[in-house]
Image (cartoon, rainbow, N blue to C red):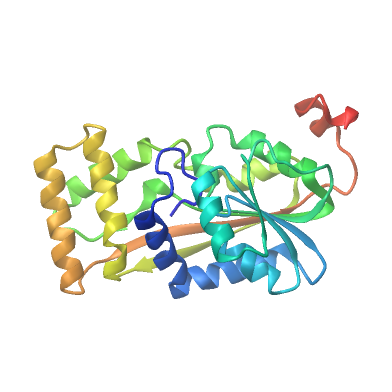
Amino acid sequence: MSKERNEERATPALVALLDAAEELSGARQLRRRAYELLDAGPGSRVLDVGCGAGRAVDELARRGVEVVGVDPDGRMIEVARSRWPERDFRRADARRLPLPDACVDGYLADKVYHELHAPEQALVEARRVLTPGGRIVLVGQDWDAFVIDSDDPALTRTIVWARADSIAGPRSARRYRNLLRDAGFGDVTVEARMEIFTDAAMLPMVAGLAEKARATGAVTRVRADAWIAEQRERAEADRMFLALPMFVAAGTAPRRADSDLTLADPDAERR
């Protein structure tokens, strides 16, 4: 699930779907692992990029961390502020962060980078705002690799790939390691986890795959409706199965200024 949306702006239905996904046991475990990799203790400063409705910001703040959450969706920021008015939420793009240089000890981007056409630009910003030795953690899914049980595997494959092709960077998660290394981060690690979804609460997300495939012309309305009907029957009979590989990459910002940042950002020396 994405928290930074270019096309699907926050609506009550979308927020409810994100809430349901974040409450799943696997999602909670994944967030805890991301926090461990951030190594953010009380008094440390963390930036949550693509913060969505703000759950991670609140959870980190409860650990004594000073957190700023940013998201490009103004409506989502409104939702976050209404839920946690004492937290710091700001509307901002991952490639243009409203923060000074070297001001945070940790940078978290959870299910964000697949929405970016140029993730390299976001990593330049990450380097800029992180303190030397600061930690970066990227979490995301591979949109080509959805595994969905269906009576029509060929149609399912068409739907999954059509949905992936509609996203700016559907395979960005498999690139995390190289993206971080190319951006100058050290100590880069990558972990993979398989998230399993069988709950009927995920039916709107599964149906959304087919709706997007239909909208792009990859499948007809009749075929999309038939596929959604099958998935609905599976959900009602507790037979729905969706598996999604999630990748968690982490790295450390250089401990001294590096010429790569200056070359990528000509204004760096003037800040």
Q: In the figure, is residue 237 to the left or right of 2? A: left
Q: Position of residue 210 (x, y in %)?
A: 23, 46
Q: Position of residue 201 (x, y in %)?
A: 30, 67
The structure residue drawn at horizontal position 52% and vertical position 72%, both measured from the top left corner, is 28
The structure residue drawn at horizontal position 26% and vertical position 61%, both measured from the top left corner, is 203
The structure residue drawn at horizontal position 48% and vertical position 58%, both measured from the top left corner, is 246
> Which quarter of the rendering shows the C terminus?
top right
> Which quarter of the rendering shows the N terminus?
bottom left
Viewer-proximal residue, 127 or 247?
Answer: 127
- Is residue 121 at all visible to an observer of this figure? yes
The structure residue drawn at horizontal position 56% and vertical position 51%, both measured from the top left corner, is 77
- Is residue 174 at all visible to an observer of this figure? no
Q: Position of residue 103 (x, y in %)?
A: 83, 50
Viewer-proximal residue, 268 or 172?
Answer: 268
Question: Relative to 71, does residue 229 appear above or below in the rendering?
Answer: below
Q: In the figure, is residue 198 to the left or right of 237? A: right
Viewer-proximal residue, 138 or 59?
Answer: 59
Quarter assignment of residue 233: bottom left
Q: How many marks?
A: 0
Q: In the figure, is residue 267 to the left or right of 145? A: right
Quarter assignment of residue 204: bottom left
Q: Position of residue 200 (x, y in %)?
A: 26, 69
Viewer-proximal residue, 241 or 130?
Answer: 130
